[in-house]
Each structure stands twice: as C-alpha cells, then as structure tokens.
Image (cartoon, rainbow, N blue to C red):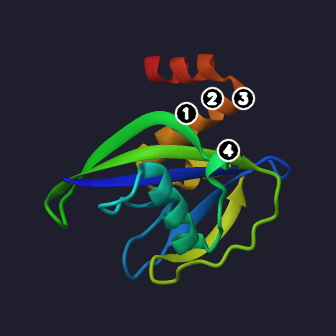
Amino acid sequence: MRHTVGLVIYHERLQRYLILRRNPERYRGWGLIKGGIEQDETPEQACLRETLEEIGVRLLSDALKDLLHQSAYFDNTKNLIVTVKWFYICTSDDMCIKLETEEWAEHRWATYDEALYELAWQSHQHVLRLVHARLFGHRQHLTQEFEN
C-alpha cells in the first residue's frame, strides 16, 4: 500500500482551477497535484513538499484546507493500492508556476466545467466536484448528479 496526498488549487480572482497535463512519455491526460507521503511526514507536510516539487510554488501550511476526503485506487503497474488524502486551497495570489518536467508537460487555469471535462481520472473529477460544492454550496447539484 502507498499513501499519497492530492491538492486542488482554486484561484479566486481568476475563478479558475489549476490543472496539469501529464508528460505524455509517462502518462496521458490532465490531472491534479498528487504525490507520496514520506516516512517522517504528516500528510500536510507532504502536500506542501509535493506542491513545491511539482509546480515550484511554496505554500503556507495555514492555507491548506483538509477536504476530509480520501480516495483509493489500484496501481496495476506497481501492483499496489494507493490511498490519496485530499486538500484544497483558495488563493488570489499570482503563482509563478515552474513545472517539474519529468512529470508534467503543461498547466492552465480552467473554469470548473473545463477542468471537469479535461481531468482524465474519475477520482480527480470527483474531488473537483467536492471542492466546488464546498466553495459554492452546490451540494444539491452534487446529490442530483449521483442520483441520476
């Protein structure tokens, strides 16, 4: 089993979410920041470190909000279960994003609908829906979506 963290970044002034396109030599599709928790780290510390490593942005720990959601999937390339503890942040600051090019090829600020369409993994889409509902109170829409 591997324990990881994930992060959704919402830019309040732009009213957009940060999405990242994977390096096509490794994976295909758009995703969110995600990475492993090291042995002596808390999930919060891992999230801050992964954000710095993957997009070159140093976040303050008090900016992180715990989504209180965890997802899991089976990684068939490594034959193990991966758990993801999810966080989100809201910012109005301009971010000087410097992608870790081995993992990421491109980034963009997308509207909710654009991000939902572009995200390649259902778990990332679900987390985006949860964050959007938390930020904008669209719980009724979220409930209806799962009932249909």
Give yes or no for contact between labels 2 and 4 (Cβ–Cβ under 8 Å).
no
Question: Residue 93: image x %, image y %?
Answer: 82, 58
Precedes in sequence: disc 3 or disc 1? 1
Gap between marks 3 and 1, in whole Å?
10 Å
Residue at the disc numbered 1: 130
* Label drawn at residue 38: none
Precedes in sequence: disc 2 or disc 4? 4
Please identify, in this view, whether the residue under mark 3 or under mark 4 is nearer the observer: 3
* Label drawn at residue 136: 3
Precedes in sequence: disc 3 or disc 4? 4
Give yes or no for contact between labels 3 and 2 (Cβ–Cβ under 8 Å).
yes
Residue at the disc numbered 4: 112
In the image: residue 97, left or right of residue 76:
right
Question: Residue 95: image x %, image y %?
Answer: 75, 67
Gap between marks 3 and 2, in whole Å?
5 Å
Q: Secondary structure under badge 3?
A: helix
Amino acid type indicated by mark 1: Leu
Is residue 117 depicted above or below 31 in this figure? Answer: above
Give yes or no for contact between labels 2 and 1 (Cβ–Cβ under 8 Å).
yes
Residue at the disc numbered 2: 133
Amino acid type indicated by mark 2: Ala
Amino acid type indicated by mark 3: Phe
> Badge 4 local density, few (<14 within 10 Å), some, or many (20+)?
some
- In depth, the one of 117 and 11 nearer the eye is 11
Give yes or no for contact between labels 3 and 1 (Cβ–Cβ under 8 Å).
no
Gap between marks 1 and 4, in whole Å?
11 Å
Please report the residue visible at 52 percent of the width from the left and 18 percent of the height from the top: 143
Q: Secondary structure under badge 1?
A: helix
Gap between marks 3 and 4, in whole Å?
11 Å
Residue 56, quarter of the rendered image: bottom right
Residue at the front extreme, as displayed: 40
